[in-house]
Image: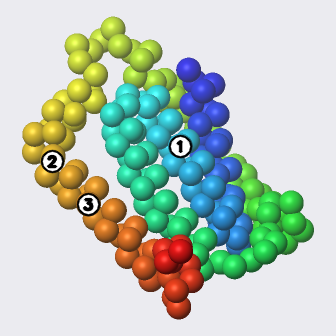
Amino acid sequence: MVYIMCIFMLGLVLGTIVVASNPSPYFGALGLVVVSGMGCGVLVGHGAPFLSLVLFLIYLGGMLVVFAYSAALAAEPFPETLGSRAVALNAGGYFVGVVVGASFFWDGWFGGLWFTVDEVSEFSLLRADVGGVAVMYSSGGFMLVLSAWVLLLTLFVVLEVCRGLSRGALRAV
């Protein structure tokens, strides 16, 4: 399980580098999806599967709005990818910066904190996420529904703003 968590953390860092170094909104949105998936995988490994599911759905809704907005505004016929020279050099610089930053903290690193909640399940009666589910549906249910409506409204507002002079994502056919 520790190896899976290391893969999730590596994917989180590499996805963040892709988002930071990519000038094209298409591939930046793809990097955001990777980052949110890997971050939610880290949450699942540390014992919060329901929180991870809710955050992933909210992230995907927000990223759908961001992707629709950026795709409507970006009219690049040939967007730059990670294979282009400028983006690859930028990503390499960020990767070197991450390695240098991690080397400062490497001596004080303690790998014993990498165990996950499933490895110590014999010491607990309930998973920590079960109480959060009850509170979310009892006290936070209204806020959950309100958040879903706000995301839907934001999607339509962004699509209407991007429409322009009868061209864009929402147009009369």
Q: Residue at x 81, y 72 (%)?
A: 78
Could you say which quadrant of the image residue 134 lies in?
top left
Residue at disc 1, secondary structure: helix
Q: Residue furthest left?
A: 139
Q: Residue furthest right?
A: 85
Estimate the x, y position of residue 168 in percent, counting from the top left.
Answer: 56, 78
Q: Residue furthest front?
A: 173
Say whether disc 2 or disc 1 marks the residue closer to the N-terminus.
1
Estimate the x, y position of residue 13 in percent, counting from the top left.
Answer: 63, 49
CA gap between label 3 and label 1 equals 23 Å
Q: Nearer the viewer, mark 3 or mark 1?
A: 3
Say whether disc 3 or disc 1 marks the residue closer to the N-terminus.
1
Q: Residue at x 33, y 62 (%)?
A: 152
Q: Nearer the viewer, residue 168 or 129?
A: 168
Mark 1 lies on residue: 37
The chosen color scheme is rainbow
Q: Nearer the viewer, mark 2 or mark 3?
A: 3
Q: Residue furthest bottom?
A: 165
Q: Residues within 10 Å of mark 1 (few under 14, many from 20)?
A: many
Mark 2 lies on residue: 140
Please name the amino acid that badge 1 sits on.
Gly
Q: Residue at x 34, y 62 (%)?
A: 151
* Whether residue 14 is situated above or below residue 165 in the rendered picture: above
Q: Residue at x 61, y 71 (%)?
A: 71
**Camera sees residue 105:** no
Say whether disc 2 or disc 3 marks the residue closer to the N-terminus.
2
Could you say which quadrant of the image residue 24 lies in?
bottom right
CA gap between label 2 and label 1 equals 24 Å
Mark 3 lies on residue: 149
